[in-house]
Amino acid sequence: MHIATELNAQLSQLQQQNLLRTRRVFQPGAQLISFAGNDYLGLSQHPLVLKAYAQGVQQWGAGSGASPAVIGFQPPHAYLCRQLAEWLGRDDALLFSSGFAANHCTMRSLAPMYMQVVIDKLSHASLLDGMTDATNSWKRFRHNNVQHAQQLLSAEGPNLLVSESVFSMDGDQAPLAALADVAVQKQADLWIDDAHGLGVVGAEGCSAAGQLTQRQLPIITATFGKGLGVMGAAIVGSSDLMAYLHTQGREYIYSTAFCGAQAAAVSAAIRLAQGYEGQCLRARLADNIDDFRTLCKQNNIALAPSEHAIQIVPVGSDQAALMIGNLLAEQGIVVGVIRPPTVAKGSARLRITLSAQHSQAEIKLLIQALIHAGTS
Ligand SMILES: Cc1ncc(COP(=O)(O)O)c(C=O)c1O
């Protein structure tokens, strides 16, 4: 059989290159401390989020029953859209099962309306894949290099300028105000994927939307599976954008909506992120980031610059990164071991993510484990 031989050959090659990903079951609490998730505020375990989910299941059932365009758009979904719009100061929002689907759908639907799309080189795979499928002209600007973006934007327009608020594999942040200025200058529409900023960055956790108006930043990707601790995503922006995607977005139309209970859980998480508790959690997270970076400095553990919960230990070789990851796991610490194709060849790294819920003792254990694994 062709498939068996071909798969075997491909898998052997990946194994030899140290690029084979193996499935592993992560059982939280089983004497393992995770520094690998994106639940930066710990909202996935918050009693009010859990209660909203449980009550939502009782009220709305375990599934939505259909696509949002049929009967899958129910009162908790409608409430969540209004809540997102109000929180982020936009007209409206459209819900998707995942950030990947939201980005891919929106890019493929919108890109053909532009002469050119100019996108940060390190943008997420969902945006790049959407772009590839849209097949119109697109260019990648050097990471966070606004001048380069400006050079690439076409004088003729219309242009779409795309970046992320916080880069998931680096932890650094985009110069949003400068990107918005260039967008105005070049008559480009700006789209920011706020996957790792929402709930975590800025006053009330508004992140990019807190810094730029809808006019300056007409398209935002909001994901619910990271700082908000649940799952799913939304595109947030103008009423016309939502009306268009509702009618034309293939991932939106031809896919079952996430359930009402999930919408209710996300709403509960947003209320927390917006309010006083969110403020306290963000302050605790900032303290943890500070402690971690100070301890790394004291112990000569080199880190990439980042003020975000995402902290990077550059390693280089895939084999060395895997070995360090395994040594950490032996000591009960789980971190992300990031290799190509997620990052460029020769730039394998440890992706350490901090949460407001990590204790000082856990951060000290992480530092000890990193020293023991030879990173200092
Ligand atoms: C920047 C960015 N955008 C989008 C996504 C996709 O979001 P989701 O996990 O909800 O599919 C991710 C997740 O990895 C991400 O890091």
Image (cartoon, rainbow, N blue to C red):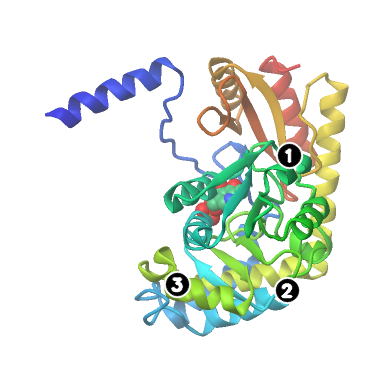
* The quadrant where residue 180 appears: bottom right
Q: Secondary structure at mark 2?
A: helix
Disc 2 and disc 3: Cα gap in Å? 22 Å
Residue 117 position (above or below residue 375): below
Instruction: Let me know if residue 354 appears in the view.
Output: no
Choose the circle earlier in sequence order: 2 or 3.
2
Q: Which mark is residue 124?
A: none
Q: Which mark is residue 148?
A: 1
Q: Specify the amino acid type for callout 2.
A: Trp
Choose the circle earlier in sequence order: 1 or 3.
1
Instruction: For the N terminus, give its image quadrant.
Output: top left
Residue 259 position (above or below residue 134): below
Q: Secondary structure at mark 3?
A: loop
Question: Where does label 2 land, which residue?
Answer: 87
Instruction: For the C terminus, give its image quadrant.
Output: top right
Q: Specify the amino acid type for callout 1.
A: His
